[in-house]
Image (cartoon, grey):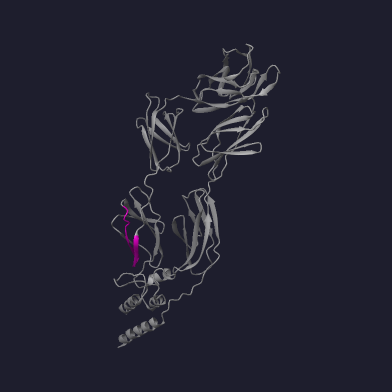
Amino acid sequence: MHKMSKKINIFLMLVLILTLVTPSFAGTGITNIEVFVTESDGQITLQWNDPDYGDFSRMKITGAAKTVYVDKGVQQAIFTNLVNGIEYSFRLSAISNSGVILGETVVFGIPRDETPPERVSNAYGIPDDGCIFLYWNDPADKDLDRIRIEVSDRVIEVDKGVEQLLIDGLDNGIEYRFVITAVDTSGNESDGVVITSIPEEGVRIHLSGPEQVQSEQTFSVTMDVSSSRNDIYAVQASLQYDADYFQYIGYEEPENGISVIRIDESTEGCITVYVARTDNTPITGQGNRIITLEFKAGNVVGNYTGLFNIENALAGTAPPGDQIPVASNSINITIASVILPEVSDVKVLSGDTKITLSWTDPPGGEYDRILIIVDGTKSYTVEKGQQTITIPDLINGEVYQFVLKTMDSEGNTSQGVTVYGSPEAGDQIPPSEVTNITVKAGNCFLKLNWNDPEDADFKKVIITVNNSDVYEVDKGVQQLAISGLVNGQVVAIKIQTVDETGNTSAGISITGIPGILGDVNYDGVINVGDLAIAAYNYLVREGDLKWEQARHCDVTGNNEEPDGIVDILDITFIAKKMLEQQ
């Protein structure tokens, strides 16, 4: 009789609750979530102070094509692998223990590359009447955007890859100072390279020599004068070099009517040359050899690169007898312990995010491997005879520089063969997302079901749980049971699709809370408290503002599966479970 009375009381209470059910919500909102955004190279860091609210549990952050959950007390999230220069938005939502969104804010950030590019190299100017032709080599930085040239009160910017500029409207006889600066896509600037040149009716000394010599090898450095004037009869120039590594041993006089009048080698590391025309004709036209200087390379361990630079070059005019400054260039010469042969017939095959290189090894036994340098930063080695390599993890559409060098067992390398290539984008379209996702909670587990996309190249589903555990589910399986969970704790789940090429979708983020079916407050038992929560959320359905907090009450439906609404079937189910526990 006593048990019968208890059952009658429970059903009377159920009837009373159903008569009082109204879809209402009373919550406490949090405002003014202050977020600090730190922008760095390919990365954005978000920091905040957790809301001072007892029910606050975690921060949900949505942005950069992902959703992450950060537990109370951590107060920081770092987003990496971002594209520099692109603005990203991040929505931060403060979530309570019961899943209620207490407050939100949106912040923005732009990841910024803070590393400046390398300087331009081999910069020089060729003067002419009222103008200067500037030439240089761009640095190898793949994020190089432009080259900035500053002269007097003018600033001129040149796109990468041009490597030359004509600056006209200048006054003859006046020395101009040019500052050449490399600028990357994030606005970082290299150190400026300064050259000076004097527009004139074209007088210039061109210095040339070998790029590489062997230890103790004798080699030549030549000076040639080009002039569009008809009154140049004498030239003087001082050649600066590193006397610790290069020994001057003599010179050869040209056979073109130009005579070497004097050589001054009294200053270590400097040779001053005085030449004059002795056949009563001016030094005019292109490529007039004025002297060939002979040097001997020192004996080095490894490689050493030295600078040869002309300073204080002057030309004498006749009949007025004036002296005018002469433009010139500099060269680098590398002393190598061993000179190795080069590879040949290099071929570049573009692929999706990769480049395949092939080549023909040179004959001989002086080397045992090939060194491949990518954009001057990353390097690979392959054994002699392999004659091919695939460089992975490249960016489609970017132009890459590849230098192939032979290398011996001591680490000596050849000068190298340089080629360029750009990986081609293959299939870059990710598959569609999964659909009809359902989450069924159980005791310490969650069961997921979904429908695979219909893309012909769809391969698998990747499921990430709480940003750590990753599951891969093959095409056609369409379900996954996640066990070992803690009842009542929110589980963050991201479901992504992957195709045969490896393209991955942005993914769909959902949450689930494992627990005993019907125990909606997760206290380990099903009682009147669970019944009250279900009654409080009566008729709340998927898509409503309250659905996030109410969906855990949706425990059954007409097919005995959750149906997206908290209705009489759910309340009856909970009441039935209460009776079963009596």
Q: Nearer the viewer, residue 420 or 333?
A: 420
Q: What stretch is highlighted in magenta?
A: 435-455
Q: Quadrant of the N terminus?
A: bottom left
Write the residue at 57% across / 27% down: 330
**Picture layout, residue 2 above or below residue 400:** below
Rendered location of residue 496, percent (x, y) = 37, 56
Q: Nearer the viewer, residue 303 or 344?
A: 344
Q: In this view, does 56 lie to the left or right of 458?
A: right
Write the residue at 64% across / 26% down: 200
Residue 375 visible to an observer of this rendering: yes
Locate residue 193: give its quadrant. top right
* Magenta residues, dominant SS class: strand
Rendered location of residue 278, percent (x, y) = 63, 12
Q: Nearer the viewer, residue 125 or 295?
A: 125
Furthest-top residue in this view: 279
**Picture layout, residue 18 above or below residue 163:** below
Rendered location of residue 263, percent (x, y) = 63, 16
Q: Is residue 498 left or right of residue 326?
A: left
Write the residue at 35% across / 73% down: 518
Residue 268 visible to an observer of this rendering: no
The mark tally for this picture is: 0
Q: Quadrant of the C terminus?
A: bottom left
Q: Nearer the viewer, residue 392 or 182?
A: 182
Q: Is residue 328 magenta?
A: no
Rendered location of residue 356, percent (x, y) = 38, 37
